Amino acid sequence: MSLEVAVAAPFKARAQDRLGQGEFVVVLSLEREWFSPDQAKRLVDVALGRGLLASEDGDLVPQFDPAEVTVPEGFTPDESVLREQSTFESALDAVVAAGVEKQRAVAAINERQRALAVTIEAAAVLYAREQGVAVDRLAVDVREELAAEAGDAGGDLTDADDSGAA
């Protein structure tokens, strides 16, 4: 995955397990010349959103082992890594990476969405779990989205009935 390679590169270059955002951006933009500084900052946002990076005490900390990632000679990441994926796209990518044919996965996800009357994101996470794919972070995102929608509609997914509370 080129996003993981792009995120690993600064940590490998500095042989560090945490970097300030400025140093991370410098490696990607000035040293590697892969992105402009603004694009490198966007990459940070995408990587944080996908759970590849965490922000701890002002530093960026990889949530995987960069030493396990190979940066191929002459590698240049595609700018598509700067595009944030939806929960559905992330779940589908995880299922396909686990060996399920993409067309089959999309058809199965669509069927679950219709049969269960749930969002496409919920159906994708459900299908991924059925296939044994670890999508815990995505499941949390789907639950939060559903809770927010229920809150907007006046419902509450956390309290079944609090009308009798005094």
Image (tube, rainbow, N blue to C red):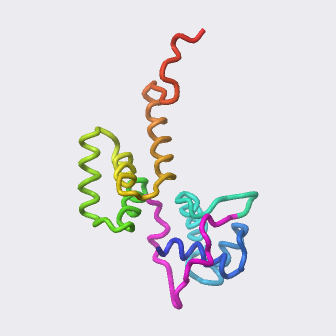
Residue visible at 52% across and 90% down in the picture: 74
At 55% from the left and 83% from the top, the residue drawn is 71
Q: Quadrant of residue 94?
A: bottom left
Q: Quadrant of residue 5?
A: bottom right
**How many discs mark residues in the rendered view?**
0
Q: Looking at the picture, how far across and down is residue 77, in whole percent?
A: 49, 78
**Magenta stretch, residue numbers:** 60-85
- Is residue 59 toward the left or the right of residue 97 in the image? right
Identify the image quadrant of the C terminus: top right
The part of the image, by quadrant, that contains residue 16 is bottom right
Q: Is residue 36 above or below residue 90?
A: below
Where does residue 86 sit, x and y in percent of width and height? 42, 55
Prevalent SS, magenta region = loop
In depth, the one of 95 and 75 nearer the eye is: 95
Question: On the picture, is 163 further left or further right than 125?
Answer: right
Where's residue 29, x and y in %? 62, 78
Residue that sits furthest to the right in the current view:
57
